[in-house]
Amino acid sequence: MGGRYGVSADVVAQIVAQAEARRPGLGGMRLICVDGPAGSGKTTLAGQLGALLPAQVVHMDDLYEGWTGVRAGVERLHEWVLGPLAAGAPGRYRRYDWELGRYAERHAVPVADSLVVEGCGSACQGVDVYEPLIVWVEADDDLRLRRGVERDGEGAREHWLEFMAAEQEMYARERTRERAHVRLDAWGRPA
């Protein structure tokens, strides 16, 4: 996962089958949340799920206002995307451009059969009302940090370390791993 990696087609198909068997609890849609620590491989798995379902993928990274914006990003997910969809209306959001430090283009999230939301905080307890399928992806801290620095550059190392500490607190509070229906390691094996 994590760009060069990926979950096996069999595992992805099993997750899709679980998602399709769920009651559509987000308006008339099924919600799949791919959560877990940064650098564990969520984005790659979410892309695989989105392609097979098919479903749009919303990335939490697009909703955070930088390294310290996770909590506000979760609020934006509910306000801009999930709330409208639950009411049967399209969602929409503006992508935050981390490099420029400001909001960029707008994205529409149409009412459809399914929606995949991936990223840290995507499965906070507030989503439970929508009866999501929660997929947890994890990796050890050394691998996550290595992936993050490879992607974002050595200058981001301190940001990564701070973010990793903050997300640990969030996951303990939200009990995300314990609430997950599917738990995978960084290579797509049961965790």
Image (cartoon, rainbow, N blue to C red):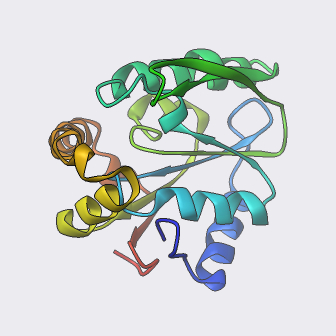
Q: In which quarter of the image is the C terminus?
A: bottom left
**Whether residue 48 is situated above or below residue 165 in the rendered picture:** below
Q: What residue is drawn where x is 82% and y is 19%?
A: 89
Q: Is residue 184 toward the left or the right of residue 33 in the image? A: left
Q: From the viewer's side, name the closer residue of 43 and 9.
A: 43
Q: Is residue 153 toward the left or the right of residue 77 in the image? A: left
**Within the image, what quadrant is residue 52 found in?**
bottom right
Q: What residue is drawn where x is 65% and y is 59%?
A: 47
Q: From the viewer's side, name the closer residue of 49 and 131.
A: 49
**Whether residue 128 is situated above or below residue 52 in the rendered picture:** above
Q: From the viewer's side, name the closer residue of 80 and 175.
A: 80
Residue 8: percent from the left, percent from the top?
59, 83
**Whether residue 185 is situated above or below residue 51 in the rendered picture:** below
**Within the image, what quadrant is residue 90 found in?**
top right
Q: What residue is drawn where x is 40% and y is 57%?
A: 151
Q: From the viewer's side, name the closer residue of 88 and 92.
A: 92
